[in-house]
Image (spheres, grey):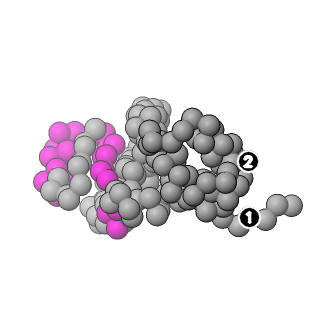
Amino acid sequence: MRSRTRITIRDVAQEAGVSYQTVSRVINDRPDVAPETRARVQRAIAELGYAPNIIARSLIQGRSNTLGVVGYGLELFGPTRVLTGIERAATKLGFSLLLGILDRLDPDRMEAIINDLLSRQVDGVVWAVPGHVSVFEWLAERFGGLAVPTVFL
């Protein structure tokens, strides 16, 4: 069985016979890499099974590329389809999701979920909480002033 040690860009660089900076330029799709070199690095990435460290990248970029989703009524078909749509759209834009599920509209649980999402440095929050206008108004009043973009569906 193959060792499960994490492959780094330095490992890729050694395999491809280039500097780690060149590997970084290839990973970030910079134009200043010769096509043959790019192909060699991409081949090394594939052969070694390299995957970028998303946490390190988010620290450098100052964003997590993660959206928090607060879901309610997910045992029903409609809200589940909404969540599926959110996930597909987010994936196309390079975002992953963190999901907090409400089994009832409990203010303490909603606050715990939002605090958890914010502590994980999400870049935005989507409230997929179907309901009456009064519920949306209450949510907007209580949680609309977050430090990240917030959308109510």
Q: Quadrant of residue 117?
A: bottom left
Residue 82 location (% of width, % of height):
40, 34
Residue at screen point 23% across, 55% down:
148
Residue 86 location (% of width, % of height):
40, 37
Residue at screen point 40% across, 52% down:
66
> In this figure, which residue is indicated by the disc labeled 1?
4
> In this figure, which residue is indicated by the disc labeled 2?
47
Q: Quadrant of residue 109?
A: bottom left
Is 30 included in the stretch rendered in magenta?
A: no
Magenta-drawn segment: 118-143
142 vs 43, nearest the viewer? 43
- Asked whether residue 20 appears in the rendered view, the answer is yes
137 vs 83, nearest the viewer? 83
Q: In the rendered structure, which amino acid carries the disc numbered 1? A: Arg
| Mark seen at residue 58 | none
Instruction: Answer with left or right where residue 107 lies relative to residue 101.
Output: left
16 vs 103, nearest the viewer? 16
Instruction: Answer with left or right where residue 141 lies relative to residue 22.
Output: left
Residue at screen point 24% across, 48% down:
150
Tell me if label 2 and label 1 are in contact, CB under 8 Å.
no
Q: In the rendered structure, which amino acid carries the disc numbered 2? A: Glu
Numbered disc 1: secondary structure: loop
Numbered disc 2: secondary structure: helix
Sequence-wise, which precedes: disc 2 or disc 1?
A: 1
Residue 106 location (% of width, % of height):
31, 59
Label 2 Cα crowd, 10 Å radius (few <14 / some 14-19 / many 20+): few
Numbered disc in front, either 2 or 1: 2
Above or below, 10 against 17 in this view is below
Residue at screen point 34% across, 43% down:
128
